[in-house]
Amino acid sequence: MSMQIIQALFSFIGGLGMFLYGMNIMADGLQKAAGNKMKKLLGILTNNRIMGVLVGCIVTAIIQSSSATTVMVVGFVNAGIINLTQAVGVIMGANIGTTITSWLVSMKEWGAFLNPEFFSPLLIGIGAFVMIFSKKTSKKQVGEIFVGFGILFIGLGLMSGAIEPFRDAPIFAKAFTVLGKNPFFGILAGAAVTALLQSSSASVGILQTLAANGVVTWNSAVYITLGQNIGTCVTALISSAGANKTAKRAAAIHLMFNVLGAVLFGIIMFIVFVVNPAFADGAVNSVGISVFHTIFNITNTVVLFPFANKLVKLSGIFIRDHQEEDVLDEEEDILRHLDKRILESPTFAVQTAVSEVLQMAKVTYNNVEDAFKAALDNDEARISAVFKEEESIDRLAKKLSNYLVKINNLSLTDSQHTLLNHLFYTVSDIERMGDHAENIAELAQFKVKNNIHFSDAAQQELEGIMTYVTNSLDYAIKARSEMSWEAVQKAKEYEDLVDYVESELREKHIDRLAKNLCKPSSGVVFLDLLSNLERISDHADNIAGYVKKELKK
């Protein structure tokens, strides 16, 4: 192998690496810049399939990977966030969204001034200066997009430059003649390269680079492009391993959608090429590939969209539901939602974490209420239930904290990092509230064992302060879920009220003890209950306080 060939190979591999790296940086910048808009898209997912197609298209255009979008969809289905019918729309939209990259790659053929290789060094320079010297996060995100965009096209230029000296080499002519004459080999080649690179955008980019050098024929380009759409399904299929049956069916729908489209278009284009062999053997440029790639994905979506429910039923035939997935308890339901596939999109992952922290807070709220009733009524059944639920809360705290660590290592904005830190603290506060509920249940257990009963006056006093405590917790949860300033203030008001009432009741009860109006054993239990109640409201105020800091920014 001559030194020229080795150098060209190194340049091509380096160019491909820069292309992938640039695409990754650009996608990170776009995701950060999208911010809350990505969060709103999660809500749109719960609407009709048409909106799902739109969401899939937009998300894929932002994260620059249909594979990543589909993997994320598998995660959403596995977590029970969306159903299969909604997933079909998103998967179809992802295929349309991925065509954006091919249009970016073909820009060099739009005109000399629009050639990205002409202005990409300038973009990298501007982007680097903005990232280094700008203090505003939003400007730094724009800088990231510029740098990624520039590196992407410099990588393409390297690949194109590596191939150009060999454009007249017989190997290219022979290879694309074979792939063009045999649809099966063409589709297989496209699928294999895409599966290997785990990115249809990258494989289409390589094909367009070859096309820009005039070595690709129309018939080979069409079959390879169809194969690339099938190859992009491999990532989602691998990701679905270990997921539930419904998530596996989502990955299968993705494969069926692309295979059916490839077969349909493959037959149509085969007939076209037989009728017009001159067109089939003619050279295609990168714009031509972009046009075909876009027409194929849009037409495939339009044709198969009315049959979305049929695809869902068909997936059920291939992957049968054995009914082993029973109704989950609250802990299992939360843990199921912490799906690692959702980490493909940091913004969606952050929003999922917020939802599950809130769910853990609601579980703890119910346990706190049960502990209160157990203490007031000496209810042994409730005491046992509180102990059991507390073990579940401890496990949830550990799992959620681990999930938050994983999200924190993703590419996030400053505000998202702040939110994650607050979620860490919130999980800790919720876990401590669970501990205090357990303490109250232990005091209730002591009351039962020692046959302790409070007077009517003491009962009424406890019921009153317990109502204030549950109100403070209720408003704290509302503050986080709704980002409500009013709820933050209400949580603080009830916490202050709990502090005041706790102090008053403590003094009154000590006075009763001094006058022998109350037994010492019941007096100690009463005072310990007050301490635990006051600590629960403190933690509720902490949770609302984190929201207050976010609202002030």
Image (cartoon, rainbow, N blue to C red):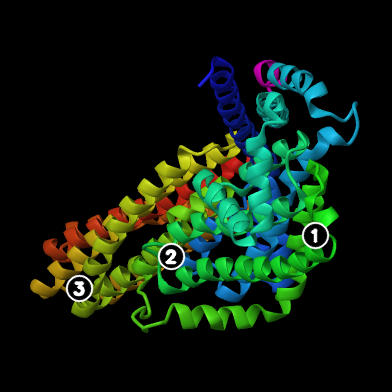
Sequence order check, earlier mark of 3 and 2: 2
Where does residue 9 sit, x and y in percent of width and height? 56, 25
Q: Nearer the viewer, residue 305 or 3?
A: 3
Q: CA distance from mark 1 to mark 2?
A: 48 Å
Q: Which residue in the rendered view is the most extreme toward the left?
A: 450
Question: For residue 464, what is the image quadrant?
Answer: bottom left
Q: Residue at x 46, y 46 (%)?
A: 423
From where the camera sits, is residue 142 visible? yes
Query: Where's residue 497, x and y in %?
Result: 47, 55
Query: Where residue 447 sits in the image (x, y, percent)?
Result: 15, 70
Q: Residue at x 82, y 52 (%)?
A: 291
- Between marks 3 and 1, how big is the CA–CA gap? 63 Å
Residues in magenta?
130-139
Give the number of the disc on residue 362.
Answer: 2
Q: Amino acid at mark 2?
A: Lys
Magenta-span inclusion, residue 100: no
The residue indicated by pointer 3 is 384
- Which circle marks residue 295 in the picture? 1
Q: Quadrant of the C terminus?
A: top right
Could you tell me what secondary structure mostly forms the magenta stretch? helix
Q: Is residue 38 visible?
A: no
Q: Secondary structure at mark 2?
A: helix
